[in-house]
Amino acid sequence: MNKFEILGLDEQLIQAVNDMGFETPSEVQEKAIPILLDQETDLVALAQTGTGKTAAFGFPLIQKINADSRTTQALILSPTRELCLQITNEIKNYAKYTKGLNVVAIYGGASITDQAKQVKRGAQIIVATPGRMQDMINRSLVNITKIEYCVLDEADEMLNMGFYEDITSILSHTPDEKNTWLFSATMPKEVSTIAKKFMYKPIEITVGAKNSGSDTVQHEYYLVSGRDRYLALKRLADANPDIFSVVFCRTKRDTQNVAEKLIEDGYSAGALHGDLSQNQRDMVMKSFRSRQIQMLVATDVAARGIDVDDVTHVINYQLPDEVETYTHRSGRTGRAGKSGISMVIVPKSEIRKIRSIEKIIKKQFIAKKIPTNIEICEIQLYHLASKIKNTEINEEIDHYLPAINDVLSGIDREELIKKMVSVEFGRFFNYYKNAKDLNVVESKEGRRSQEPGKIPTSGDVRYFINVGERDGYDWRSLKDFLRDTMDFGRDDVFKVDVKESFSFFNTDVAHTEALLGMFKDFKLDGRFINVEISSNPSGGGGRRRNRGGDRNRRGNSGGGDRRNRSNRDRRDGKPSSDFRRKDSSKGGSFRGGKKKRY
């Protein structure tokens, strides 16, 4: 039995749910759907981005709408064109077996005449951005005086974007007896004002604590000098070769500048900000969704409403002016139960903002170090080796193998491997081998030295473990594995850093003896799982000697394949490597690079 049936959904909706593969409702769906189906009431639902809010109001809305009537019965307001279209498409999918139901999207950047015609043909549900909706009301192109339901989705974002007057004006054209359902990630004063003014005794549901961050997101900060911020961004990308991220900047100018620098340095990046035309925005988002762009550099306003699955990292190139905005940024990753990482690159002068955000989101930030040159080179080298191993062989080269074998004759296996890897890796290594340390020490009290492999007398200890992403772990599941194995408490394992085939984590020194004892001869599925004290306790793992057997030192996740650079790039201090190559396809304000696979 599908668990959605318990919520009271009718047969047509259950059939659509089954088609989409939904089996278990999310927390906000479990709480909101029965209330909205059983009662005619106003509702305030506080839940993070990516928790399934569209289905939470979409299912009850479809079930309550009279599809036999052509009258507009429901209005859904959302902050951006992208979110408006996303909601429209999702509701159409939910209503695929509900005959006669028509959903129309109203948004800027498209023909207002065409949209008015669609509404006139009969739209029981209208999904709209506030600006375009107000325009259509002013032109008498839409009638919402008989709606029964009004949904304010991402209400805090709409208000942050300056839509307060539009929203109040739109709601003034709706009947008083309607039901208003307000969904928001946070509850600032402006949202409370809307609720008090236009809602009557609303039922309030909260997923997690108010204004809190998602439990699926790990929050990290990297302390660097302000002038090294861009170099730090590149190193974080290089340390995560499979990164798929949104990079947030405060201003449109910074957004464009950072994106252009990344593209010049060979990273697959693109800019998203308010100075782009709608066509340029569509091009950027299409490239990002298809993963031609790995690093989307965006302003807060432009990024609102983006709903792209599997974003691995959110990188705060600059912290937002408003602390609450950080919640929306971090909500772009760790969606639908998946884990994600929110990184902050911060100068010493803004470290106090980290503490303010911690109070708001009720989550603690992990202080981490920008990876060293050796760590990045190791990660990239093992990543390259893994790519070579997993590359599917093109059988068409068989014809050329005799000639290739003649060219490579006399070279033994080990030397051939060295030469092959050096072709891709040499110049990248030469760039990084003399790169400076970008890390800034937060305070003298926070500094801690530990002799490699030795157990300190106090504080916490960093460990190496020979499992990682290719074994199916991320930071959250590895943390759960260690806690379950050792019967640790909730906060006994921290600073978890998962690479491709190995990882690092910290515990209090009091657990060291028991932990090392447990993993002395520990086997999982016939494989030895080794844990030892890390030789680089301050960061993510330093260089390690190959101890053979089950120890497979591979690098990790995130960041980008390298591309060719010119000598001028090298003189300008840009990593020069065949791992990245420039893409010359630039047009207007849109700039994007196509990822090269090796």
Image: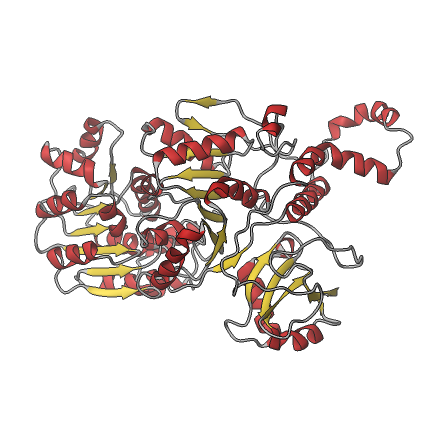
- Picture quarter with the C terminus: top right
Occupied quadrant, residue 243? top right
Is residue 176 something that shows in the picture?
A: yes
Q: Of all residues shown, which one is farthest toward the right?
A: 410
Q: Is residue 373 depicted above or below 508 in this figure?
A: above
Q: Is residue 93 left or right of residue 381?
A: left
Residue situated furthest front in the rendering = 444
Residue 506 lies, in percent from the top left, at 59, 66
Question: Is 400 above or below relative to 542?
Answer: above
Is 500 on the left or on the right of 163, as rendered? right
Asked whether, in this view, residue 262 is left or right of residue 30, the answer is right
Is residue 122 among what the camera can see?
no
Residue 537 lies left or right of residue 367; in this view the side is right
The one nearer the camera, 346 or 103, is: 346
**Image vertical order of residue 156 relative to residue 273, above or below:** below
Scheme of image coloration: secondary structure
Number of labels in the image equals: 0
Where the N terminus falls, by quadrant?
bottom left
* Residue 529 spot, x, y in % from top left: 71, 65
**Rendered location of residue 91, percent (x, y):** 31, 46
Q: Quadrant of residue 457?
A: bottom right
List x then y, in percent, for residue 24.
42, 61
At x 18%, y 51%, the residue is 150
Residue at the spot x=52%, y=22% of the render? 584
The residue drawn where x is 65% and y is 74% is: 512
